[in-house]
Each structure stands twice: as C-alpha cells, then as structure tokens.
Image (spheres, helix red, strand yellow):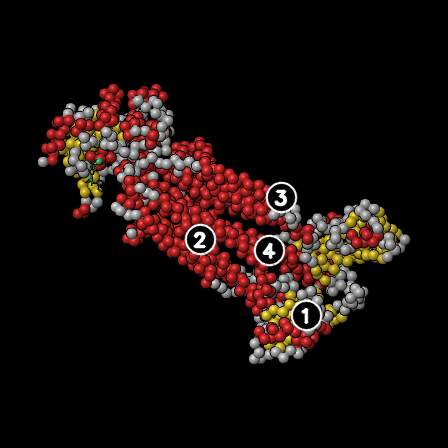
Amino acid sequence: MSVPLMTIPDEAPPPARATAVSARGLRKTYGTGDTAVHALDGVDVAVDRGAFTAIMGPSGSGKSTLMHCLAGLDTPSAGQVWLGDTELTRLGDDQLTRLRRQRIGFVFQAFNLLPALDARANITLPMQLAGTRPDRVWLDDVLARLGLSDRLRHRPHELSGGQQQRVAIARALLPRPDVVFADEPTGNLDSRAGAEVLGLLRSTVREMGQTVVMVTHDPAAAAYADRVVLLADGRPAGEIQAPTAASVIDALHQLGD
Amino acid sequence: MRTVLLANLRVHAARLVATVLAVVLAVGFVVATLVLNETSRATALASAGAPYLPAAAVVTSLDGAPVGVGALLADIPSVGAVAPSWQTVLPIEVPERAGVRTLLVGSVAEAPELRWEQLAAGSLPDEPGEIAVDRRSGAALGDVLTVLVPAPVDRTGGGSGEPTESSATVTGIVEFAGSPYAGLFGQAVVTPAQAQAWGAQEPSELRVAARPGVSPDTVLADVSAALSDRPVSVLSGAQQARSAADDLTRGHLQLTAVLLVFATVAVLVAGLVIANTFAVLLAQRTRELALLRALGATGAQVRRSVLGEALLTGLVASALGTGAGIGLAAAVAALSGGAEATIPLVGLSVPPWAVGAGLLVGTLVTLLAAAVPARVATRTSPLAAARPMDAAPLRSRPGAARVVLGLTLLLPGLGLLWIGADRAQVLVAVGGGVLAFLGVVLLAQLVIPVLVAGAGRLASRIGGIPAQLAAGNASRAPRRTAATALALLVGVTLTAAMVVGAATTRESSTAAIAAAYPIDVVVTQGSDPLPRSLAGELDAVTGVGASAPVSVAELVGPDGQPVQVFGIEPGAGGRAVRSEASFRLPEPGRAVLPPWLATAYGVASGDAVSFTTGGRALDAVVTIGDDDQSEVLVTADQLTATAPDAAPAAVWLRVADDADASATVERITQASGTAAPGSAVTGMLAQRAQLDGLLNGLLLVVTGLLAIAVLIALIGVGNTLALSVVERRQENGLLRALGLTRGQLRLVLAWEAALISGVAGVLGVAMGIGYGLTGVNSVLGGVGDVVPVIPWLQLVAIVVVATGAGLLASVLPARRAARTSPVAAIAG
Ligand SMILES: Nc1ncnc2c1ncn2[C@@H]1O[C@H](COP(=O)(O)OP(=O)(O)OP(=O)(O)O)[C@@H](O)[C@H]1O
Ligand SMILES: [Mg+2]
C-alpha cells in the first residue's frame, strides 16, 4: 500500500522506518505584518507506526492546524511533512487529494457524513472516489467490529451521534490507510458514547495495528492514547508516555502557568 | 430593521444579480413590445391616415355604391371644399422602359387644404394631361407616359372595342411609403377630371374641409344632418384616419397579441427564477434570520425586511429593464426602416403608460415571487439559530394533495387540448393548454427529480462518481431542482412548440398559398399575337424557375357556339403551376371544363365531349375544373392536332423560391415588353410573396424573442448552482478531504447543470411537440389541411443548446467550488 511516490528529499534525511508521520520545522502563519498570527511556530514531531497518539493543548494553541498540515489538508507556510517515505509538502493539490483517498483516514468532530448518502455509501465513498472496490471480507470485519451491520441502509439523520461517529471510523479504516486522523471525535458526544468511540479507536490500534492521531481537549480521552504530544502557542510543549487522566491534567496545568 | 435590510442588500448584491437580470429581461421584453406596438400604430396613423387628417368630415358609402352627393355637400354653408376620391387601375407605358406596367391611379384634391400627398420632387398635377407618380412606377420627372385607356364597359357586360391611347406628363414624384396599397405595382395621382376621363369609378368616399373660421365639429354635424337618410357613414377626419390605420395594423395587432403572450411567459419564467433565488437566499440565511428573531425581531419585522429587499431590487431592475426595452425597440425600429417593410417605422413613440406598465410589472412580479419565501422565512423559529449547520436535510416529497390536484388539472387539460385540436377550436385548445401546463407545474416536483435521478443513473455509467454525486445533489432537493428545471422547461416547451408550429404552419400554409395562387406570373398577349419563342426567352430570365407556353384556338363547342380552347403541355404545365390542388391540368385525352360550361353543355366528369373546327373533331373525356378556372384546357398536342393554326396565347411562369419577387417581375416585364410589345404581365406573385414574407417575419420574430425566456431560465440554472455551491460548502469540503479532486468537483457541478437542463430540455421538447401540433391544428384545422412537420434536427439542437448553456452556466459556480479548501469546509 505505501508505495513511495517521491524521491528521497534532499534537505533532510527521510524519517526512520518506525515513524508513520513526521514534521520538521513546521510553520503556519495567517495574515501578514502586525496582524500575522503564527498558528504553528516551528514544530518538530514524529508519530510512531501502530501507535495511538493524542495532541493536546489550550484552545488556540494550533492543534487543529497541526493535524491539518500532517494530514495533507492544508499546506504549511514553511517546514516539511512526511507520510512514510512521501514528502507531502512537495505534492500538488491533485496528488495530495489522491494520497488522502488512499493513505489517510479522517474522523471529524461534526459533519463527517454526506447527508444524501446512506451509511454504507458513506463508508465506501473514498474507495469509490478512488475507483476501487472494497475488500468484502475486510468490510464485513470492520462493520462487525463497529456494530454497524444492521444500520447500513440508514441515512445520517436517522443515526445517533455515536452511530454517526462509528460510521465515520468505519469509513476511515476501510481503505487500510497509513494513518487515521481524528479531530475531537468525541466533542459532540455524551460520555458513554464518547467512551465507546475511544474504545473502538484504541482497539483498531491494538488489534489491527492501525496508526491513529487524535486531537482532543479531554484528558479522559487522551488517557486512551499511548502517548500525548503537548502544544502551546504553536510550539511543542513536551509529551507524556502512557498517559492517565491525572497525568494529563497535571501537564496541562503546568502549561497554563 | 432598515440597517439590516441595507446591510443585506450590500452583502448579497452579487446573489441578487440573477434576480435583477431576470427582471431586466422580462420587463425589457414587455416594454419593447408595447413601445413597438405604439410606434407602428403612430406610423400607421401618419401614413394610412394621412389622407383623412386634413378633412373635417369623411363620407363613405356603406354599400360600396358611389356617393353622388358632392354637389349637395358643396351647398352647405359651413363646408369649404369637397374632394371626391376617384380611383382606377390602368396599364401604362413608361418611355425607355419595355413592357406595360399596371398603375393604381387616384385623384388629387382640388382644394389645397385637402391635399396630403408628400412630394419628393416636382409638383402635384393641376390640369388634365399631368400626372404625379411614385418611384415604383419607374418614371422620371418630365417623362410622357402612354396610358392605355380601356374602352368603357357598359353594365350589360357587352362592352367591346379597342383601348384608346392617352398621354400624361410626369410633373411630380410622390412618396407613398406606408400606404396600404404599396405593393409590387406603382401608384399615381391625376386631377379628378383626368381620372374621370380615364374611366375611373364613381367615388365611394368624399373628404370634406371646413370653410375658414368654421369649426370641424360644426361641419361634421351639418354633413351628418344633411346625409342622415342616405346609406353612408359620416366620420370625422381623425376617426376615419384611426380606422384606416387600424385596418392596416390589424395583422400587427395580432402579432402584438402573440408577443404579449410570450412577454407574459417571460414574466412568468422570471417570477419562477426570482422565487427560486429568494427561497435559496433565505434558506441560507435561516440562522441569521433566526438570530434576529432570537434577539427580539418580530416575524412581521423579518418579513418586512425581506419584502423591502425584494421591493428595492424589483424597482431598480424594472427601471433598468424599461430602459433596455426602449433601447431594443429603437434598434428594431431602426432595422425595420427598409422601404420593403409594410409599415416602415418612423421615429419612436414611447407612451408613458408603457413605462409605467414596465415598472409596475417588474416590481410586482419581484414582490409576489418573494412573498412566499418571505412567509416561510417568517416562520423561522428563533431556535434555528442554535441548531448546528448540518441539520438533516429535508427530503420533502410532494404531498398527495398536490399530486391529486396536478392530475385533476392535467387530465381534463389534455382532453380539452385534444378536442380543441380535433374541432379546430382555438379557445378550447388554449384553455386546455393552460390547464395541462398548470398540472405539469404541480407535478413537476414529483416527476422532475425522478427523471433527473433516472438520467443520473444513466450518466453515472459514463460520468462515474461525479455524475453520481450530481444526481444525488439534484434529487436531494427536489423542490429546488424542480423550480430550476421548471423555468427552463417553460422556455424550452414554448420554443419547441414554436419550432414545430412554425414548421407545420409553413408546410401547411405553403400548400394552402400555392393552392390559392397556383400561377406566379402570366404573360398574355396584347394587340399582337405572342411570338412562339417567347416562352423560351422568358425561361432564360434570371429568377424564373419554370415556364409553360399556352396556345389557343377557336373551336365550336357541343352547343354549336364558338369557344376558345387552350392547349398546354402537361409536363411543362405541371412544373409551372405551384399546386394542382385547386387547379386542374388536362391529362392526355381529357378536357378540363369550367364548372359553368360543363353545366351549359350538360356534361359531367367522365362524359365525352367534342369540339370541332374545319371538319376535324377534338374528342376528349370531361374533367371538371376548379371554380376559379374559366377556360377550356386540353393538352397542347391534342389542340394542334385538331387546330394546326393554334396561336400562342400566354406564358405561365413560376418564379424560383429564392428569387427576389419584385426584381424578377421587373425583369419579366422588360423581357416580354421587348420580345412582344403590348404584352401584359399579371399574376399572383405579389400576393404570394407578401403572405410568405409576413409568415416568415412572424415566425422569425416570435422564435427569436422566445430565446429571451430561455435565457432568463438559464440565468436561473446558473443561480441555483451558485447558491448550491455556497450552501454545500461544508459538504464539498468534506468530499475534497476524502479525496475528490478539484477537477472532479468541477465535474460534479457540470453534471448537475447538464442533468437538470438536459431533463428540462428533453421534457420541454416532448411537451413542445404536443403543444405545437395541437396548437396549429386548433388554429389552422378549420382553414385547410394541416401537414404535421416535426423538425427533428432543430429540436435536437434545442436540447443540445439548453444543455450546453446549462453547462456554461455551471462554469463560474464550479470555479468557485473548486477553490473551496478542505480545511475551510471542515471548520464550518
Ligand atoms: N483561517 C485562519 N485565519 C486566521 N487565523 C487562523 C485561521 N485558522 C486558525 N487561526 C488561528 O490560528 C491559531 C490556531 O488555531 P487552531 O484552530 O489550530 O487552534 P486549536 O488548538 O485547534 O484550538 P481549539 O482547541 O479551539 O480548536 C488560533 O489563534 C487561530 O485564531
Ligand atoms: Mg481545533
């Protein structure tokens, strides 16, 4: 699946094999002059393959911007981003689009699904866009794991918020992407539905070896991850291995000071 | 709320462009029609009414008999002068121009105050022997014309004798442009005495002038009183002028009525587009309006704000449209100034009421069209402000009531259409057509999304995922899709109906006109026999398509009386005659007899008849000719076999369809005048050409103007797409994030446009064929045979153009959609 699309970059050595996504010297500036906002101000980060990584930080610290740049949704003002061996920052819009189809999965906080399509059509949409057919066995496996087998004909407004997020996860997993990115996937859910979604994300990492990167506000959610990357004012602000809710709250507290 | 209203207008000005354009086009159409109508009316009054405007009173015979009361009127004290109008038609020879031409000769008033003729050069005739002619006559100032005055015909019909030659000197050139009699033949005026000497008919019309200082009303009253017991009508000069102008413009009034029907349609389509625009505009602003409500604005305030926006937009657009309409009318008037026009338009009359009507119609339509969406917007609950943007889309299905009502309109409508077409009842057909169309409009919400979805399934075979997404988009908002398609549907239906109707009318009336005027031009002998070579020489004249010589011999009929028998070669005759539907040509061994002669001989069709001369007999089987045929016709071979001395009597000519009628007649006159001096050129070409031209012009104008309705509809398509891009920003962004390329996103929009306009195009053409055929049947069915013609090529072109234009309409919205960044979309 992960065929190198580009030659080895010359500015910097390619990232190590065990890294799924990495960024070096990432900057993103909105506006110019006095009103310029440095959403990202020199971020180096590496996400391990087969791990569940959470990105945390105060509101406005650049979490979403970082995720968008890592996922090829947005282009940074400076710096480099690799997905495996592929340097995203060198790709054109159409190449990025095709790469997103095949190698990246997304779960957003809201508006994840096309209202016109039923659950099944939403799940297979990226594959359809790529002109490929889903692997039936894999599809059934994913649907069974997410408990969606009897909901396939329903359209988004006929599903609960938790069910909608599960559909979005199924869609993200189906093409067996290199990385699944999730931006506050539980932000709109109550704690029970949220816990269910987070459990599912963790089990895809544990059982399928999927790489997942999740942006969140919630220390309890971050506790599901293997590692937490902290961000403050667009800069890396440390990380926590094997986080618990308590250690995350503690770290965030220190950032606030 | 005014601040909100103005801020909205500023921010959303770009989105109102579609509304403004639709109103401008529709209002422009209405105003141009009204202004052109008024202008042609004014022009007609100035030309056809010109003779009557100087008169205080006009006396017209009610039964066509002469009004011999000139002397009586002259004795009335208030009357200043009386001008009888003498008229006759005379063959005239112009020096240095071969051939005899026919001139319509009238009399000029003796009293200067009753003269109205406009001189281009020279002066009006003052005494016998003088004549003023128009340019068409071909004569120049100072020419001496030879006039062939026919011998007087007495009432018993037995008149005979050679025509006498008279002459007249051209003293003036007159302008008769716009005269109802301006046709292929020239016109001239002479003094009343000269007109009488040339055998003009007793006048059936007198123009009366007031004595100086006397009011025209007094004269009118005096003349009316003096003539109260006679079979005449007495009108004031102004009244008579108006009635003459009305006679002239009657055809144009029908055209105006037709144009106004289409103008109504244009307004209707504009209304649909406007309602659509406002509905989507307000749907987008649901949250904004809800916020206003939550902050304390009343429903009425919100409604007033929306309607105020519509009112301002409508007013501005109507003013623009009125200006555009006047400009359009001026352009048409300038273009139609050619001398060949029946009514060359002079100047431009812009009646204030036309301007008022334009402003009113445009503003009202905009207001009415915006009223429904405004009412819906008022119902916005303040809660909507708090609802997330991706609220479940309403998949509103048309209610059962709508379907039932639609069917109750459609089915009887179709029945009435059928009856109207079958019995040639225009009003029944129109009523049925309106009912059926209303039915279609109601059912459109049900039918069109289904059709679009079906077309989308077909399209996704070729177009893949973009086509599939497009079909989904189109059928997801059935109401909006239907409204968009409906506007286009109306335009395409009418255009297709017009194209089918025009082709059918053209085919049917060409046949009817050909039957009514079978022979274009007939060259007949004068005092000398025609040379045998004449037919060949005329055949070589540019513009002549076919010729057939006719020979004649005097034989003795079965009743013992001499009778002229004409011979024609059937092959040549068949080529020269346009239609044999009401003109029988003889087959070998047959004799075509005029019906009255067959009665006189006591023979019927299929009987034997025999004509004799010098001991030889011409035996033939009777064919009864048409009522209009007045001669015995046999084949040329049979005639010469019996009467070897049969002489050329006439040549029938058929003018090529693409030839200029009047130039060809001129050339024929020249050629026959040179080859056979004294021969006369007559025929029905002028009438045929005039009818043909009228029909062509009418069809061209109506079809061209219909394009405006389609144009408005296409603006609607572009508008819908543009708004759907804004509306689906998030959705498009999600698709981009999930892997839809920019090109594919553009394709989605293109497919959406193609699907909607293609379905509207096909459906419209299908309905148009039905409407066109039933329409023509209901109008012409009573007059003659209708030959249905379906011009497939043009109809396919309509679908292609509609779809292509729809695609074009998608270009700008698609570019905008492609610029959507996936991030911006997710951010909401
Ligand atoms: N399109 C934009 N234009 C200008 N500034 C922007 C834009 N997007 C983000 N920013 C700014 O960049 C900074 C980082 O934004 P970002 O959305 O990444 O923060 P975040 O950490 O995701 O915050 P939150 O937790 O509230 O979602 C903020 O200061 C924000 O105002
Ligand atoms: Mg964020």
Asked if marks 1 and 4 touch (Cβ < 8 Å), the reply is no
Residue A26 lies, with reference to residue B20, above or below; the image says above
**What residue appears at the point 32 percent right and 39 percent down from the top-left corner?**
B729
Q: In the image, what residue type sits under mark 1?
A: Asp
Quadrant of residue B553 within the rendered picture: bottom right
Q: Position of residue B199 (x, y in %)?
A: 73, 70
Question: Which residue is tagged 4?
Answer: B693
The answer to whether residue B516 is visible is: yes
Side of A226 relative to B214 (left or right): left
**What residue appears at the point 74 percent right and 65 percent down from the top-left corner?**
B678
**What residue appears at the point 43 percent right and 56 percent down from the top-left corner?**
B360
Cα separation between marks 4 and 2: 28 Å
Question: Which residue is tagged 3?
Answer: B422
Sequence order check, earlier mark of 1 and 4:
1
Counting other residues with Cα less than 10 Å from the Cα at mark 1, is it few (<14), some (14-19), or many (20 or more)? few
Residue B21 lies, with reference to residue A156, above or below; the image says below
Comparing A228 with B643, the one in front is A228
Question: Which residue is tagged 2?
Answer: B25
For disc 4, the chain is B
Quarter of the rendered structure image containing ligand 2: top left
SS type, badge 1 = loop
Quadrant where the image shows the C terminus of chain B = top left
For disc 1, the chain is B
Cα separation between marks 1 and 3: 48 Å
Side of B613 relative to B805 (left or right): right
SS type, badge 4 = helix
Which numbered mark, 4 or 2, is in the foreground of this view? Answer: 2
Question: Which residue is tagged 1?
Answer: B229
Which numbered mark, 4 or 3, is in the foreground of this view? Answer: 3
Q: In the image, what residue type sits under mark 4?
A: Gly
Asked if marks 3 and 2 touch (Cβ < 8 Å), the reply is no
Q: Are marks 2 and 1 on the same chain?
A: yes
